[in-house]
């Protein structure tokens, strides 16, 4: 019996790219149809075209099949990335992955370590299909091996919990409208007040526990913004938005040339007599964070400078350094400054693969569990924040305004997402925002805020000359109006809008629109084409 081995090569690839990530018999015809995106069709056609070309031009069957198998292996990683992060890989994202391969390769190994055992069987069962396709005399074995491949693909699809379930909203807050206590501050803060911003990495509201902290404990006079959002779940974007008030929602990385640096938050404080410093335990050269730090702050320290300063004393991992180094950086040169400080401190240990350093006393119960490691790193960072606050207060001996927030949250299966960048549900876009002012003796609660309004709101606490405040973008004001666009990073797959106490999320690939409250408990699908058109109009006309 004669047959073309390319047919089995391409058929295996077709099974992988369509059947494996979204089995039709589990999710139904409607979900099956919408995921046949033109990119998938293009990739499949390109794969088959290359295989046919190799078959025609390369007479050695072993060489041509080996090339096809290499392409199949790369495609296997492609599909699993889509499956793991619940996102279709657009060409812009593919180019980004290639461009930043050396920075992202550690994450790739971490991702592979998290796959279920059945997924490896899918890949291993594909090998006999390719080997047997070299021969035209073993049709029965080839058919049997292909059937085995299909069987393992089916079993592996059943192992994917994020494809089978949508998690319940992980929040315990009441769905009633929250009334704010707008008594803070009783008067404008002195221009001699230190401002210290703790910028956590990947910590969402769902994972934050105030009672793990001594200084932000629920029995302390702490202010809280109950629903605080970031527009794009990506570090460099969040840093830029917090410092400028600009989202630049259509750009993958911040465009510094489009914003006058004199209008950035650090430059305004510098103009009013502050010493501005950026401390960051991650590598700042990634995604032009170093340019943000250089242009906006007087001095900055990142992972590279930390290791140079302390002669590699602190353990490193793929995305940073032991955050204990940040505590050590707060030495006499910082503490003894005669100028008031504007200090931005960025952490790293809660970034995947969730680093548990040798100095971390909060060891995870199970080191193989990513979420356990994440919580261990988070408790460690909270512990370090407490120590930093105590050191600054005791040695600076002046009023200090402490703010704790995060660049984004981290998904661990909620709504089918893992990691960050692509979900705009609360797991990745809702972050803690806590305030501790040394002169304040009463706790207070504010209903809502977002990082695009952070600059305006922080400046409203001071009385700097020549600085105008928009009360509608000041979440310390009763006139505040919550209005924010959300978007998955480097992809148009998910778009969102928050207005007041309502939130809308649109899945552009499926064409589905959901309306919900800020806690995401009351989700309603809007099926009207008019509603979807109105949503898209508002999104594209929204402020940037």
Image: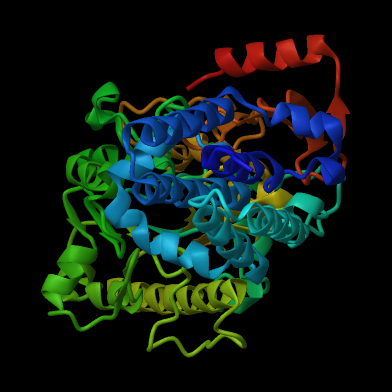
Q: Examine the rendered structure and indicate whether residue 410 appears above or below residue 387.
A: above
Residue under the image location 79 percent in, 14 percent down: 531
Q: Examine the rendered structure and indicate whether residue 130 appears above or below residue 313.
A: above
- Residue 101 position in % (x across, y down): 31, 51
Q: Is residue 415 at least partly visible in the picture?
A: yes
* Front one among 148 and 42: 148
Q: Quadrant for residue 513, please give it.
A: top right
- Residue 273 position in % (x across, y down): 21, 46
* Front one among 398 and 70: 70
Residue under the image location 37 percent in, 50 percent down: 190
Q: Examine the rendered structure and indicate whether residue 318 appears above or below residue 413.
A: below
- Residue 241 position in % (x across, y down): 42, 37
Residue under the image location 52 percent in, 25 percent down: 42
Image-based side of 312 in relation to 73, left or right: left
Q: Is residue 431 at least partly visible in the picture?
A: no
Q: Examine the rendered structure and indicate whether residue 351 appears above or below residue 358.
A: above
Q: Quadrant for residue 480, please give it.
A: top right
**Colour mapping used in the image:** rainbow
Image-based side of 515 in relation to 437, left or right: right
| Quadrant holding the N terminus | top right
């Amino acid at each position: 019996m004669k047959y073309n081995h390319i047919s089995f090569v391409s058929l295996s690839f077709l099974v992988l790219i369509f059947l494996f990530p979204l089995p039709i018999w589990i999710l139904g015809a409607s979900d099956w149809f919408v995921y046949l995106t033109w990119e998938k069709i293009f990739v499949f056609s390109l794969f088959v075209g290359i295989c046919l070309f190799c078959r025609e031009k390369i007479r050695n069957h072993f060489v041509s099949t080996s090339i096809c198998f290499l392409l199949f292996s790369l495609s296997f990683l492609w599909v699993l990335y889509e499956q793991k992060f619940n996102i279709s890989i657009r060409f812009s994202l593919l180019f980004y992955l290639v461009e930043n391969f050396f920075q992202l390769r550690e994450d790739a190994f971490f991702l592979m370590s998290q796959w279920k055992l059945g997924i490896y069987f899918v890949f291993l069962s594909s090998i006999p299909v390719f080997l047997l396709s070299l021969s035209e005399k073993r049709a029965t074995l080839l058919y049997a091996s292909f059937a085995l491949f299909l069987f393992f693909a089916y079993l592996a699809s059943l192992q994917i919990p994020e494809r089978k379930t949508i998690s319940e909203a992980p929040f315990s807050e009441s769905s009633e409208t929250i009334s704010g206590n707008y008594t803070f501050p009783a008067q404008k803060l002195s221009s001699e007040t230190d401002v210290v911003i703790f910028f956590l990495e990947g910590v969402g509201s769902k994972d934050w526990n105030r009672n793990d902290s001594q200084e932000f404990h629920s029995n302390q006079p702490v202010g809280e913004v109950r629903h605080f959002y970031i527009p794009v779940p990506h570090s460099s974007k969040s840093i830029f938005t917090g410092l400028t008030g600009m989202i630049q929602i259509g750009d993958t990385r911040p465009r510094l040339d489009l914003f006058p640096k004199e209008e950035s938050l650090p430059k305004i404080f510098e103009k009013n007599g502050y010493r501005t410093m950026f401390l960051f335990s991650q590598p700042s050269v990634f995604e032009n964070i170093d340019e943000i730090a250089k242009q906006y702050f007087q001095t900055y320290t990142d992972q590279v400078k930390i290791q140079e300063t302390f002669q590699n004393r602190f353990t490193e991992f793929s995305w940073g350094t032991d955050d204990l180094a940040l505590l050590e950086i707060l030495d006499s040169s910082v503490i003894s400054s005669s100028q008031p400080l504007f200090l931005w401190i960025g952490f790293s240990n809660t970034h995947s693969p969730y680093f548990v350093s040798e100095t971390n006393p909060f060891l995870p119960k199970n080191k193989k569990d990513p979420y356990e490691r994440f919580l261990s790193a988070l408790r460690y960072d909270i512990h370090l924040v407490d120590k930093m606050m105590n050191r600054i207060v005791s040695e600076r001996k002046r009023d200090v305004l402490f703010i704790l927030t995060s660049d984004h949250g981290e998904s661990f299966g909620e709504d089918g997402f893992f990691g960050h960048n692509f979900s705009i549900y609360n797991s990745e876009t809702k972050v803690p925002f806590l305030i501790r002012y040394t002169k304040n003796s009463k706790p207070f609660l504010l209903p809502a805020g977002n990082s695009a309004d952070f600059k305006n709101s922080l400046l409203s606490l001071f009385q700097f000359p020549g600085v105008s405040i928009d009360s509608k973008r000041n979440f310390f004001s009763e006139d505040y109006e919550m209005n924010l666009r959300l978007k998955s990073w480097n992809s148009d797959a998910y778009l969102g809008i928050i207005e007041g106490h309502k939130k809308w999320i649109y899945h552009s690939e499926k064409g589905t629109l959901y309306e919900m409250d800020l806690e995401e408990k009351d989700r309603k699908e809007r099926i009207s084409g008019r509603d979807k058109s109105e949503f898209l109009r508002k999104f594209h006309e929204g402020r940037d």
